Amino acid sequence: MTKCSWFLDKKDKPILILGRAGMDLYPDPPGTKTEEAINLFAALGGSSANIAVALSRQGLSTALATRVSDDAIGQYVNSQLQAYGVNTNYIRPVGDETRSSLAIVESRVEDHQSVIYRNNASDFRMDSSDIEAIDLSIFSTLIVTGTCLTLEPSRSATLLALNKARSHDLRTIMDLDYRPYSWEEPSQAKEVYESASDLLDVIVGNDEEFGHMAGDYALGRSLAQSLAKNGKLVVYKCGEKGSATYTNKDVIETGTVPVQPIKPTGAGDSFLGAFIGQLYRSDDLLNALIYGSCSAAMVVTRVGCAPAMPTATELDDFVAKNLQRISQKIKTLAE
């Protein structure tokens, strides 16, 4: 059994997540095209907010650090996070022309459309003063997403947070979350990701994201393997084909759980939340990967992202029902 005991001695401290939180709007009922919508269902969204909710629903203490617009949307984000049990003490409102992210996301698989409004987004305004105001010593783990690194001053603030986290002996995790429309040049993303990778314990991303990080899609898997050889835990996701998880000794290949999805969104955030959440309960790396895969499968069958995140009981039940099927798609190899 491949083990990861990095988080077991940290379960009494909360987890800090940095980055995007906003409002998602879903054409209702599910299956409706955006251009044909009459009714819209509102929900909390944004990759970092979704991860925080996923962890909170697994019974872990979480806090989100970001900036939101000083308006009704920002207030909505705060109230929704609080309703999900996420600490919002480190969220600062911005009273200028920046705005919290807004997304219109269809609950449909065929010809799916997601339209995200990110120009002049509030979360990009997070700066070093936000990080300096946080006592990182009270946290166990810092989770960041690639969108935090896209623009200044958020980029420098995130790198500062990672450096300070290392000095306080926090575990550091990044979801690559590469959004090409937010970067000036792909080469810039490659350079920044490389700088951040030196400060990370766990890196999670899909095949395309590792390809961008490597500067060539064909080199993405080799980069993931190389990072693992340097002592990092790397999860290389391949969509419907499952994932390959690399340690400095093993590679674990896991499949996906067959479901009837109503949308393609939210799976990555739910995977990370359940995966890390399980590592706080047990050092069984394979079991954590199974929980991550099952959570992702559950979320794509539900409307929304944050509201779709399963509770610990729901996830335990789903894993128990599907364990035999997913166990048939597991392969552990020596690197």
Image: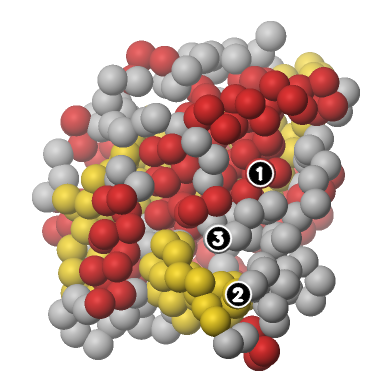
Q: Nearer the viewer, residue 193 or 287?
A: 287
Q: Nearer the viewer, mark 2 or mark 3?
A: 2
Across and down, in percent, residue 154 comes to 32, 64
Q: Position of residue 173 (x, y in %)?
A: 46, 39
Image quadrant in which you'd find residue 231? top right
The residues bearing labels 3 and 1 have C-alpha atoms spaced at a distance of 12 Å
**Secondary structure category for the residue under label 1:** helix
- Residue nearer the viewer, 36 or 286: 36
Would you identify the image quadrant in which residue 36 lies? bottom right
On screen, residue 208 above or below 10: below
Query: Which amino acid lies under the numbered mark 1 shown in the image of this protein?
Result: Met
- First along the sequence among labels 2 and 3: 2
Residue 218 visible in the current orientation: yes
Q: Which residue is mark 1?
A: 298
Identify the residue position indicated by label 2 in the image: 28
Could you tell me how many numbered marks the image carries? 3
Q: Quadrant of the N terminus?
A: top right
Secondary structure at badge 2 equals: strand
